[in-house]
Image (cartoon, grey):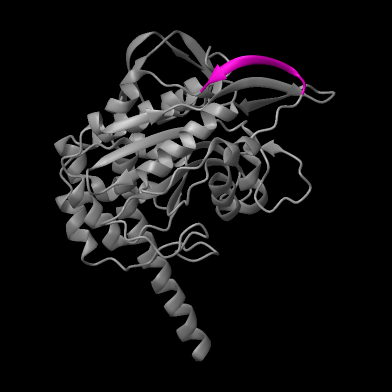
Amino acid sequence: MAQRVKVRVRKKKSKKKKIFKRILVLFLLLIICMGGFAVYKIVNTLQAADKTYDELNRGEKSKLRDAVVDIKKKPFSVLFVGIEDYATNGDHGRSDSLIVATINPQDKTMKMVSIPRDTRVQLAGDTTGNKEKINAAYAKGGKDETIETVEQFLHIPIDKYATVDFDGFKDVIDEMGGIDIDVPFDFNEKSDVKKSKKIYFKKGDMHLNGEEALAYARMRKQDPRGDFGRNDRQKQILRAMIDQMAKPNNIANVDNIAKEVSDHISTNFRITEGLALQQIYGGFKGDDTETLSIKGTDLYLGPNRTYYFEPDPTNLANVQNELRTHLKLPSESSTETDSQTNSTSGETGTSDTSTSPATSSGQ
């Protein structure tokens, strides 16, 4: 009898957790793109939702904080992780994209920086001194190791996180009737739904369904900017989704749309935090968002000439201090950050993570 009660309680908690995720995923999309639209339907649903969230092993407080930060009053950081997880759900894929945002609720400003997935770093907890691609952190230790590695790389605490499986957006985009995208150049990409099918993209305005949008977001090799160009296209899709969600028919359809993505997100945002932040940032404008760039060199190592992105130490130190200043943390001297990136011989070429100026305005 006791066992049956336990099972029922677990099922009830699981159901409430899914309700929470349905609400939060839409809010997280808003935060990612800093777009605003009527959320009255979400607010109504919030009243019946459970205050459940996916907690990190460390608990609420970052190891780099003296106390848990009140994100409604003080500057905080969020790590958005796009998961490259085609076959399974869980912690066995690699992170496809890493975006860190620092947010100041007092002056309603935000700074964003994308970390290239091939960035060469020492993973959190590694004592060998070896360096790997930063996206390996998720494959080895899931969200917890990814967060610790990013904290170690950027020298800032990561207070909140959200992991998103981009596969989940395919059905969402179909449910909302597709999205409008301004394609930057001609290219084609294999479909993830039908491997034998090629999808062709033409420069200019296109209306994409879920299958097409997924291919658009994943293409990398034909983009002259590689991972950096793909990061921009993924942000472009998120922005287009926000614009599409703002349409009256989709606001009315928010329950069905949220249901499609409920199993594709994990976060430690509490419902009350999400609601409070939405109220704070309801009138937030893209002009208040600054996009930072991590510059560096292309590096090829080993007998197989494996590609890595090697950050420039001086530029990285500047980015670290900009983020720390925005979080109201003391700046670090250059000597404290120089050890972050050690050059290794190999064939190199200049690269950076700079995005088009339109990114900061929500494109």
Q: Is residue 250 left or right of residue 67?
A: left
User: Residue 168's x, y, as percent?
Assistant: 44, 42
Disc tally is 0
Q: Residue 193, can we see it? A: no
Q: Position of residue 354 (x, y in %)?
A: 45, 21
Vertical placement of 242 versus 26: above or below?
above
Answer whether residue 316 is magenta in the image: no
Residue 266 visible here: yes
Q: Quadrant of the C terminus?
A: top left
Q: Which residues are magenta?
A: 345-352
Residue positioned 62% across, 30% down in the render? 118
- Classify residue 217 as left or right of residue 255: right
Q: Position of residue 331 (x, y in %)?
A: 45, 43
Residue that sits furthest to the right in the current view = 303
Q: Please tell me which residue lies in front, 197 or 305.
A: 305
| Rendered position, 60 above or below 79 | below
Q: Nearer the viewer, residue 18 or 128?
A: 128
> Which secondary structure type mostly characterizes the magenta part of the structure?
strand
Q: Is residue 161 above or below residue 340?
A: below
Q: Residue at x 75, y 51 (%)?
A: 127
Q: Is residue 347 magenta?
A: yes
Q: Locate residue 359, reporting x and y percent.
A: 34, 25
Of 268 and 40, nearer the camera is: 268
Q: Residue at x 15, y 40 (%)?
A: 283
